[in-house]
Amino acid sequence: MDNAIFATALGITKPWFVDNLSFDTSKQLLTIRIDFEKGSQFSCPQTEGAHPVYDSRTKRYRHLNFFQHECYLEVRVPRVKLPDGHITLIEPPWAGKLAGFTLLFEALILALCREMTFAAVARLVDMSWHQVHSMCTRYVDLALEQADLSELRRVAIDETSRHKGQDYITVVADADERKVIFVDEGHGAETIAHFAAELLLHGSDPGRIESASIDMSPAYIRGVTDYLPNADITFDKFHVIANASKALDRTRAIEQRTDASLKGLRWTLLKDRNSLSTEQCTDLNAVIAAVVSKRTARAWVYREQLRAILNRKQINVMRRMLHQWCTNVNRSKVEPMKKVAAMIRGHMEGIVQMARSRQTNGFIEALNGLFQAAKRKARGYGRLITIRTVLFLIAGKLDFTEINPHAV
């Protein structure tokens, strides 16, 4: 009766059956031995029909814990003889994609790794970091192999830092589905070329991409122009605002050398007003009130005006207001902000294109924050293969159910 109960719980059906159970109390280890009925025949994916058993091998699979005890399935696995005389091993239906684990156990690891670092999961389930990493990478690779990009029309492209310094990777996301679809090393035009080649492998064509949201990197501009020929370029408004914020901070740093009242106000000026405390709002209002005399105050006003302009929905209105904004800035004495005005004038059509596409890189910016947090918790992800796996687990929205019906 005990064997039958375990067979039902494990989902084991004929010709497989639970032969016996053993429990090692000293090691807190449960071993379930599984066999197949005498005279059974098995089908082989490469050959039609059922084939007789030639001989067998014993294989061991890590399964979900039985309460706090580790559980292993010890299985007599058949080898069958095919009509052409070849001998092949038949894996049981519960065998996972990484040798030595069941599908249920692998589904658990995938679920945990979407929320925890590889090292933390490895400690929790008493595995090595390399086993956890290999399992997740295997599933990500299998899911990406069957990914269908035929409906992809709009992409968001951005970079994220891999290490300190100028070491970057490029992340491409589906702007409509808000999911990562491509990760590559570097942040040059060649990364867009690699992405275009990837499209051809997954039922799409670079010419089908209608819109690409990027920053103002000359390499990305050249890459999209050369390899996504029909894509309208939208310059991400968050990068425009980020440049204005840098100009504001530079203005504050220069002016506070002679104005002590600006010291300690860096984050008060850079943060969104809605996220400030009551005290910070009071300090900010005091700065803004001196807009006539303080260049920092004028820089803050210019930054907020720019933010409002970039939220306009009519291209002609946005273009006209941006031209006027640039004129006003250039007539002022806020020198750092004049560089932003020059940048805007040099990229005007890509910026106003946002009014039509309503496309930004906000999703990837948020993803970058999640990845950097995960990287800090893991004390760094050094290799590209690890970074790629982590990014797809966090934000790839990959469908693993075709590979493992227990995965969510």
Image (cartoon, helix red, strand yellow):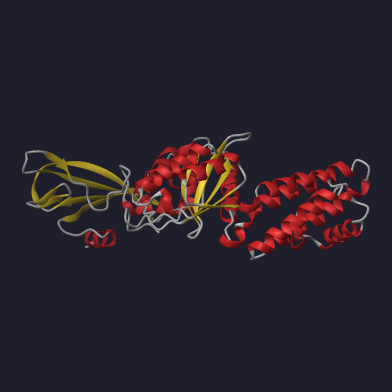
Can you name the residue that lies furthest to the bottom here?
313
Residue at (92, 56) in percent of width and height: 290
Say which quarter of the image contains residue 166.
top right
Does 177 sit left or right of 292 as displayed?
left
Q: Nearer the viewer, residue 219 or 257?
A: 219
Q: Position of residue 106 (x, y in %)?
A: 37, 50
Q: Position of residue 38 (x, y in %)?
A: 9, 51
Q: Nearer the viewer, residue 51 or 219?
A: 219
Residue at (13, 51) in percent of width and height: 42
Say which quarter of the image contains residue 400.
bottom left
Q: Position of residue 73 (x, y in %)?
A: 27, 49
Q: Quadrant of the N terminus?
A: bottom left
Say which quarter of the image contains residue 111.
bottom left
Residue at (33, 43) in percent of width and height: 98
Q: Position of residue 345 (x, y in %)?
A: 70, 49
- Residue 310 visible? The answer is no
Q: Nearer the viewer, residue 271 or 317?
A: 317
Residue at (40, 44) in percent of width and height: 198
Q: How many marks are shown on the rendered structure? A: 0
Does 104 sit left or right of 250 as displayed?
left
